Amino acid sequence: MPELPEVETVRRGLEPVMEGARFESVEARRSDLRWPLPGDFAARLEGQTVTGLGRRAKYLLVDLSSGEVLLMHLGMSGSFRVLHDGAARKPGSYHHEKPQHATHDHVVFHMSNGAWIAFNDPRRFGSMKLVPRDALEQEPLLRTLGPEPLGNEFHAAMLACACHGKKTSLKAALSDQRVAAGLGNIYVCEALHRARLSPKRRASTIATRTGEPNERARALVQGIRDVLSDAIRAGGSSLRDHKRTDGELGLFQHQFAVYDREDQRCPRRGCGGTIKRIVQTGRSTFFCPVCQR
Ligand SMILES: [Zn+2]
């Protein structure tokens, strides 16, 4: 499933073709993705100009001149493809496309600048929803999310406070979207390795008895920020389904220190440990038992 860096990569790919452009026509080729699309989905988008393209956790937020926001989630297998070919501007003209691709193009945006943006989602766990801008804070999909891990509200004191008194593992605590929004299995494993902290460690041990952050909390915040920034720079990780909007693959999987590297040598200089895989709350955790304590 795409995590924050993959969604941010998609946002950066869409921004230059969407921002400032108008939805000329919208094809909704199915009435549902994960959930039903609004009945008047196309009509509420057509004629609207995109005034901004943001991201919250794993959601893309397309600000419209109508005052509504188009909320989009990639689900498990969703991707966007941008085409600029003039011939492709005509709705339904796919002659240059691979047919197996086109069958899963469920929504196509035709923008006023000639760009043609197809949302492809074979497994259909993705979603699109229109929400009034001023109701965004009450939106159930966003309301419970914790701070953005690359934003100013995410810091050692906040993280220590969120983990204070928690008996759960550090891995489970960090995977909780109320603690850090947009983090998932891959980047939690990688961040813990960077911070030299064991995923099995009790979450409460990054805080003092009174809930103040200790050295571990600071190392963890740094590890999370670094791994996310590096991954965004590399265009995200290409595992299974993540593609950039230009069809190119993200490259961060080549920089994984622990994720999906069971039995391989820990890349930390001088460590000499071997990466182990364990299962925590139903998901694989990868870590180095030598340098992560
Ligand atoms: Zn190690």
Image (spheres, grey):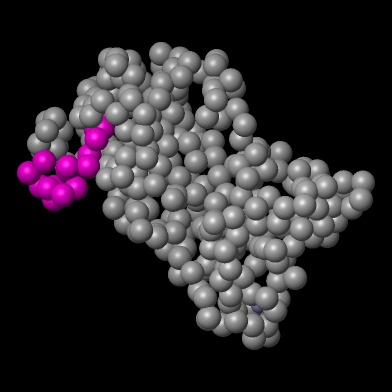
Q: Is residue 36 left or right of residue 5?
A: left
Which residue is pictured at 45% across the width and 56% down the height? 236
Ligand 1 quadrant in view: bottom right
Q: Is residue 195 above or below residue 18?
A: below
Which residue is pictured at 52% across the width and 67% down the height? 259
Question: Quadrant of residue 220 in the image?
Answer: bottom right
Whether residue 177 appears in this view of the structure is: yes
The residue lying furthest to the left in this view is 95
Q: Is residue 204 left or right of residue 147?
A: right
Q: Is residue 111 magenta?
A: yes
Q: Is residue 96 left or right of residue 66?
A: left
The residue lying furthest to the right in this view is 210
Q: Is residue 223 above or below residue 42?
A: below
Indicate the position of residue 214 as horizontal and vertical percent values.
85, 56
Magenta residues span 94-113
Indicate the position of residue 57 as horizontal and vertical percent values.
54, 40
Whether residue 62 appears in this view of the structure is: no
Location of the C terminus by quadrant is: bottom right
Which residue is pictured at 80% across the width and 43% down the height? 161
Which residue is pictured at 23% across the width and 29% down the height? 30
Q: Nearer the viewer, residue 257 or 184?
A: 184
Count of number-bearing discs: 0
Indicate the position of residue 40 as horizontal and vertical percent values.
29, 15
Q: Is residue 208 magenta?
A: no
Question: Quadrant of residue 14 in the image?
Answer: top left
Indicate the position of residue 138 as horizontal and vertical percent values.
58, 20
